[in-house]
């Protein structure tokens, strides 16, 4: 009887993989796809060691986090904060964790936005600034870099890249890049 239940459970596990697939799908965004494509196109197999190293490191670190969560019945951040007795060190650890989360999220989203911008630039021949209609029904390129995106996400103002156009309708900083 026990073997039949175990066999049925294994069959169900094959067809219902659980939340791991959703987490993987959420982790791989346009920035990841673009960065991996460009790295492969530019460097070929020269960076294969980085993929192997990153995969092994991720597996080891995730297994540590899983073991801590199973033993303590707490999340990783909660377990780290509960392991410290001093309120000053606990506050500093909480600040460090929050800073890492904010910067990590900003970098992740900057990669996603940059990947999406590069994809749109490849498909449409340029990327439109937010809210501006295309002139002459042609797409105009606006260079967006990681610093602009991070500055915008961290609450700063994005520099105005829509400056006055020249006689051909091209922006001054883009004239050299347009035909």
Image: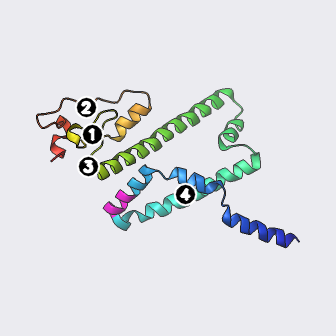
State which region is magenta: 37-43
Q: Judge depth for marks 2 and 4 and give the one in front.
A: 2
Classed neighbour count for the residue bearing mark 4: other residues with Cα under 10 Å, few (<14), some (14–19), many (≥20): few
State the residue in front, 139 or 141: 139
**Mark toward the start of the polypeptide (1 vs 3):** 3
Q: Which residue is mark 4?
A: 57
Q: CA distance from mark 4 to mark 3?
A: 38 Å
Q: Per the image, is 39 magenta?
A: yes
Which mark is first along the chain, 4 or 2? 4
Quadrant of the rendered image containing residue 150: top left
Secondary element at image label 4: helix
Find numbered disc 2 in the image and state the secondary structure of the residue it sits on.
loop
Residue in the picture at 50% in, 41% down = 104
**Quadrant location of residue 57?**
bottom right
Q: Residue at x 51, y 35 (%)?
A: 102
Q: Which residue is mark 1?
A: 142
Q: Which residue is mark 2?
A: 162
Question: Are circles 2 and 4 on residues that touch, CB within 8 Å?
Answer: no
Q: CA distance from mark 4 to mark 1?
A: 37 Å
Please state which of the two labelled residues, at mark 4 or mark 1, is closer to the viewer: 1
Give the alpha-carbon distance from disc 2 to disc 4, as whole Å.
43 Å
Tell me the residue that label 3 is attached to.
125
Residue 46 in the image, given as x and y percentages of width and height:
37, 65
- Say few, some or many: other residues with alpha carbon within 10 Å of mark 2 (under 14 / 14 to 19 / 20 or more): some
| Residue drawn where x is 62% and y is 54% of the image | 62
């Amino acid at each position: 009887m026990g073997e039949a239940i175990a066999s049925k459970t294994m069959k169900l596990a094959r067809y219902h993989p659980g939340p791991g697939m959703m987490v993987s799908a959420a982790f791989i965004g346009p920035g990841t796809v673009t960065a991996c494509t460009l790295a492969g196109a530019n460097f070929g197999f020269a960076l294969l060691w980085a993929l192997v190293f990153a995969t092994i490191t991720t597996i080891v670190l995730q297994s540590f986090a899983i073991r801590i969560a199973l033993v303590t019945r707490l999340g990783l951040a909660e377990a780290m904060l509960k392991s410290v007795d001093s309120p000053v060190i606990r506050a500093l650890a909480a600040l460090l964790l929050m800073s890492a989360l904010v910067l990590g999220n900003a970098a992740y989203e900057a990669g996603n936005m940059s990947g999406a911008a590069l994809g749109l630039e490849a498909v449409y021949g340029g990327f439109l600034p937010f809210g501006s209609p295309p002139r002459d029904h042609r797409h105009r390129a606006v260079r967006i870099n990681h610093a602009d995106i991070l500055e915008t996400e961290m609450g700063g103002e994005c520099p105005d890249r829509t400056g006055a156009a020249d006689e051909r309708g091209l922006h001054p900083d883009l004239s050299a890049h347009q035909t």
